[in-house]
Image: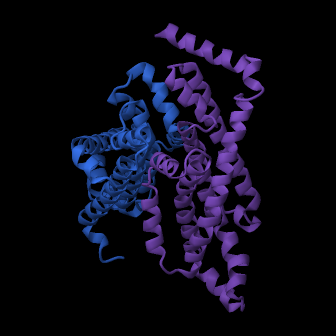
Amino acid sequence: MNSDVMTLMTGVTDWFSQPMNWQGPGSIPEHILEHVTYVLISTLIGAAIALPIGIGLGHGGRGGLLAINLSNIGRAIPAFGVIILVFLLVGYGVIPVIVALVALAIPPMVTNSFVGMREIDPAVRQAAVALGMTGWQRLWQVELPIAMPLIMAGVRTSAVQVMSTATLAAYVGLGGLGRYLIDGLAVRDLAQVLVGAILVAVLAIVTELLFAGLQKLITAKGLQQQG
Amino acid sequence: MNRDWIAANSHQITAALLQHIQLVGLSLLFGFLIAFPLALLAVRWPRLYGPSLAVTGVMFTIPSLALFILLMPFTGLSMATSLIGLTLYTLLILFRNIVQGLRGVSPIVREAARALGYTPARRLFTVELPIALPVIVAGIRIAAVTIIGMVTVTALIGQGGLGQLFITGFTLSFATPLIIGFVLSVALAVMVDLALVGILYCLTPWQRGVR
């Protein structure tokens, strides 16, 4: 088995060192670009749907339990099934993948932004009311800055999940880093699979780090010392 | 929806559902058997917490499809391949919640149990675990629901439970098996989630008045 591992490692280094794999169609940079495009589009659409729902419900404080439970059930929707189902409905293209990834991205963002808004100390809310702030002012100047770390944690969870699930796009003939996994599986070329796995894992970890940095940047200064 | 297909393939549907339940149940069981002792160690020696969280976190980051395929040279197209992959995915969620639950036990309660002469093991099982139960069950719920969706991906390596119906639907360009697999998978997740809520309710009678 040791020699097997050696062969695999050599295969992977060969793959990474061949100039052919770094340029032109089907190259590593192109697959990374495709992958990141799927992730960016789906996470942004997901955020545009999920954040207003979570923040709105958390601000108003009504219908929250229903939203949380629906969003938990949303986690149960198998992304693999959604991709194929939408593929059968609309045919080849980027839409099946985007629909599945958006559905995957929504639940963590709804839950986290709702919880973030709900966990704000009621005394702070009341202080804002006592200062005569309107609902919008309270939302933008008090509640959102306080809830921001948790909201961003939700976006981060979604982005990382979408990043690893976007590999399934290759199953319905699209690109992205899943190509290495699906093609490698088809011809039992484990070196290629490992290349894909390494690249996606690195992308996911980079996403985590980027969001950790972003979270620090947009967290209000007054909140940073506590954390 | 094609009723004839459902009637003709009810055998395949039942088998897929049973395999789905089996894969989810076993990976949750194994995940718990690994995460629980690990969490006890991390609570006892807090220095272990960071590294354990990092390791289980990296496992969680590796895309499931890649992990399943990479396990194949060792375990082939067997159920073990799916089980190992799925179990690794449950670890982060279970470990984090068990540790959080146990850490949430008030030191006063712990001291009281000690003052009453409880041995550490008895204190763990009769005092600390019951108090930590809501947080632990919350972790099991998230892990269960996540895994029920993820099992379908293992259809690509010859397992997959209800995911097999997705592949059938894709190969035949035929929506009925897909919809059946989809609905059963979501229904299973909802039922397991509700069952866990029910179990928690029965196990924690002292919480009922508080809410």
Examine the rendered structure and indicate whether residue A126 appears above or below residue B43: below
Task: State the quadrant of the C terminus of chain A.
Answer: bottom right
Horizontal and vertical percent position of residue A135: 67, 86
Horizontal and vertical percent position of residue A214: 73, 54
Quick check: A139 left or right of B126? Answer: right
Name the residue located 21 percent from the left edge and 42 percent from the top edge: B11
Name the residue located 65 percent from the left edge and 35 percent from the top edge: A202
Quick check: B42 left or right of B27? Answer: right
Q: How many marks?
A: 0
Name the residue located 70 percent from the left edge and 70 percent from the top edge: A145
Color theme of the render? by chain
Q: Can see residue A171?
A: yes
Examine the rendered structure and indicate whether residue B65 appears above or below residue A10: below
Query: Which sits in the foreground, B30 or A181?
Result: A181
Horizontal and vertical percent position of residue A148: 67, 65
Examine the rendered structure and indicate whether residue A85 appears above or below residue A11: below
Query: Which sits in the foreground, A223 or B63?
Result: B63
Chain B: colour as depicted: blue
Quick check: B22 left or right of B44? Answer: left
Q: Which chain is purple?
A: A
